[in-house]
Image (tube, rainbow, N blue to C red):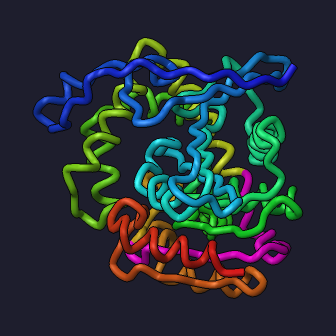
């Protein structure tokens, strides 16, 4: 039986991150219990692959005059629905209802002991969620891994997607085909068990933010570190490992040509994200993660795509310059 329930997760103290104080990082529950959310977290309960699961999501109504449209925001691998906060606020002020789900295996959602992850399965889960909310048309926005998922969703349910916006999506290239080595789920798991506030910040600063850092990013580092080092850390790490395997082994790159919905690419050109590049030989690493080229190439592959480039920005332009990004996003979504 599919059902939705409404809960408000308890608020915990948010600590400002610093490498020297990594040991003070709070420990959040397996579904981010204890983290201070700015919105109520809804829960969608459903059965999948023989397991009873819950999918956390944010559902925010328009502020002011509603335009009758719904924006669904899909988060990336190292992000959550709540990390869209600046865009949620901008979209609701523009009249949109906003749905920001956490996919199974992430953030406020279930971390199954075993689950056959696929982008098709995550798209189906989201489709079922929207069906329970009686939403049949959406503007779909996907960031990072969420861009791969949004692409799959648009391929599976094109009649439901009015607009598709892909924000620095990973999967604009096939890393395996370019020579990036495969990593076993067991190896991913051991890697994820070592996750800390310091390692998260170092990776994001180097790869996402072009060596720069803003104090407002600390909150999200604390969120991820608290989840990865809480009482459910082994279950969190195992699901993370399975998700990385899904990302590496299930490219959507070859199906961009089949997209039949109006699509906009919003690309920070200085992004260097590439799954597995940390273990790739130097000559392979040099070939992957060049978003200044990948955005242009993807725009040629996707029928009638629009490309908007944020020169000099990294993997998360919606966080680097929220005002500029949200103006561009809303302008694109508002186009008929």
Asked whether residue 74 appears in the rendered view, the answer is no
Residue ID at (54%, 71%): 330
Residue ID at (72%, 68%): 253
Question: Quick one: 17 or 56, which is closer to the camera?
Answer: 56
Asked whether residue 316 appears in the rendered view, the answer is yes
Judged from this view, the residue extending furthest toward the left is 20
Q: Which residues are magenta?
A: 250-270
Return the x and y of residue 173 as percentages of the image width and height.
63, 69
Return the x and y of residue 180 as percentages of the image width and height.
57, 59
Among the 4 quarters of the image, the one containing residue 186: top right
Residue ID at (57%, 64%): 169
Residue ID at (33%, 64%): 320
Look at the image and tell me in which quarter the N terminus lies: top right
Look at the image and tell me in which quarter the C terminus lies: bottom right
Task: Check if residue 290 falls in the magenta segment.
Answer: no
- Count of marks placed on residues: 0
Up the image or down, 227 lies above or below 81; here it is above
Return the x and y of residue 240 as percentages of the image width and height.
55, 34
Question: Quick one: 116 or 146, which is closer to the camera?
Answer: 146
Among the 4 quarters of the image, the one containing residue 51: top right
Return the x and y of residue 60 as percentages of the image width and height.
56, 44
Judged from this view, the residue extending furthest toward the front is 65
Up the image or down, 113 lies above or below 159; here it is above
């Amino acid at each position: 039986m599919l059902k939705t329930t409404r809960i408000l997760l308890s608020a915990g103290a948010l600590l400002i991150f610093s490498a020297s104080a990594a040991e003070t990082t709070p420990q959040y529950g397996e579904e981010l219990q204890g983290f201070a959310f700015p919105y109520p977290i809804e829960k969608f309960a459903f059965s999948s692959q023989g397991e009873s699961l819950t999918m956390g999501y944010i559902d925010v109504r328009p502020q002011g005059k509603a335009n009758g449209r719904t924006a669904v925001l899909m988060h990336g691998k190292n992000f959550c629905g709540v990390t869209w906060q600046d865009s949620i606020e901008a979209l609701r002020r523009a009249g949109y209802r906003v749905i920001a789900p956490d996919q199974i295996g992430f953030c406020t959602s279930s971390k199954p002991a075993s689950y056959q992850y696929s982008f098709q399965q995550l798209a189906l889960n989201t489709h079922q969620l929207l069906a329970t909310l009686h939403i049949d048309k959406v503007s779909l926005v996907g960031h990072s891994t969420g861009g791969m998922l949004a692409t799959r969703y648009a391929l599976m349910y094109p009649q439901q997607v009015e607009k598709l916006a892909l924000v620095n999506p990973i999967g604009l290239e096939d890393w395996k085909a370019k020579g990036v080595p495969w990593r076993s789920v067991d190896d991913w798991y051991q890697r994820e068990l070592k996750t800390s506030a310091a390692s998260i910040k170092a990776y994001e600063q180097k790869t996402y933010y072009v060596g720069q850092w803003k104090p407002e990013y600390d909150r999200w580092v604390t969120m991820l570190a608290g989840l990865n080092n809480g009482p459910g850390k082994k279950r969190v790490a195992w699901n993370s490992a399975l998700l990385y395997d899904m990302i590496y082994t299930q490219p959507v790159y070859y199906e961009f040509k089949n997209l039949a919905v109006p699509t906009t690419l919003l690309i920070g050109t200085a992004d260097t994200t590439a799954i597995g590049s940390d273990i790739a030989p130097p000559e392979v690493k040099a070939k992957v993660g060049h978003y200044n080229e990948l955005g242009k190439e993807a725009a040629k592959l996707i029928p009638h795509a629009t490309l908007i480039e944020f020169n000099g920005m990294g993997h998360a332009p919606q966080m680097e310059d929220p005002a500029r990004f949200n103006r561009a996003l809303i302008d694109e979504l508002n186009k008929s």
